Amino acid sequence: MIFFGTRASNIGNFNLQNSDCSYCEMSDTQRISVFGKYAHIFWIPVFPIGKTVIAECTHCKRTIEQREFPPSLNTSYLMNMTKAKRPLWHWLGLGFVGFLFALTTLLGIIGASAEPDPRSDMLNADVNLMVKNPTMESDSISYKIKSIFDDFANEDIDPEKFKYLTKISGEKALVLVQIPKLRKVKKEGRMQALEMIELITDSQQAFEGKEMYIGVKGLITMMVIKTPTYEKNSRLALTSKLYDFYGPEPVSSE
């Protein structure tokens, strides 16, 4: 199967005045059709590569290509050729490549100028510390959260594969839960998961008066986040909203 090549589309038609057909000699019967040719890849126009011009006598129906035009007919066509304008979509491929180049350049500039937030590494480190089977001795609050999920979570989302971590730092507390099959859970179900976590945390003396940072992670991304200033339950919650648990945003060195 061929996925690249050339095509043409009609880009203009117009009648020429004061022109005679060289075959039937009728006057004012010449109709010009202009076809714009373009290269394509997977049938997507990439760039224009020329035009084909055909004159047809509306009386005798004889057609001739531009190279066969008599001088008078060619002159008339050249005087009217601006009536056939090539559409912008003939440059679709070049425009798309240009857009990608500009976007890549812009993202490169932004990426080069933006300093990485060290709090991202801190959160990733805590995510990596999450465990499937916390104990009362190692993490009593995670142990209690696991217990309630084991009792009430649907077996279809494999609660035995959930992971947990709780952490207290000064006046702040962090709770992380990973549910690998969270994308299978409807929005209302994800909210119930948050409520189950809060049912435990609200009853813990260790969390009394603390600023709570709760993140519920799917297999790859955070989908439920609740902090003192942000709450989101979606396919892609802003993980950066948990960074404040680790302290204020670092001041740029510039």
Image (cartoon, grey):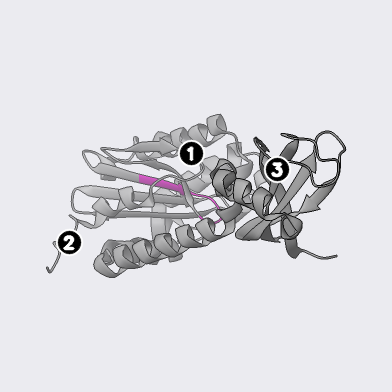
**To which residue does mark 1 refer?**
234
Q: Which residues are magenta?
A: 214-220
Q: CA distance from mark 2 to mark 3?
A: 68 Å
Q: Amino acid at mark 2?
A: Pro
Q: Earlier in the sequence, mark 1 or mark 2?
A: 1
Q: On the image, which quarter does residue 3 sit in?
A: bottom right
Q: Earlier in the sequence, mark 2 or mark 3?
A: 3
Task: Specify whether 166 is left or right of 34.
Answer: left
Q: Height in image: 251 above or below 224? A: below
**To which residue does mark 2 refer?**
250
Q: Residue at x 85, y 46 (%)?
A: 23
In the rendered structure, does residue 131 fall within the stretch colored magenta?
no
Mark 3 crowdedness (10 Å alpha carbons): few <14, some 14-19, many ≥20: many
Q: CA distance from mark 3 to mark 1?
A: 58 Å
Q: Amino acid at mark 1?
A: Ser
Q: Position of residue 209 (x, y in %)?
A: 21, 38
Q: Which mark is residue 32?
A: 3
Task: Specify whether 31 is left or right of 153.
Answer: right
Q: Residue at x 26, y 38 (%)?
A: 228
The mark closer to the camera, 3 or 1, is 3
Q: Residue at x 47, y 54 (%)?
A: 164
Q: Quadrant of the C terminus?
A: bottom left
Which secondary structure lies at badge 3?
Answer: strand
Q: Height in image: 78 above or below 61? A: below
Mark 2 crowdedness (10 Å alpha carbons): few <14, some 14-19, many ≥20: few
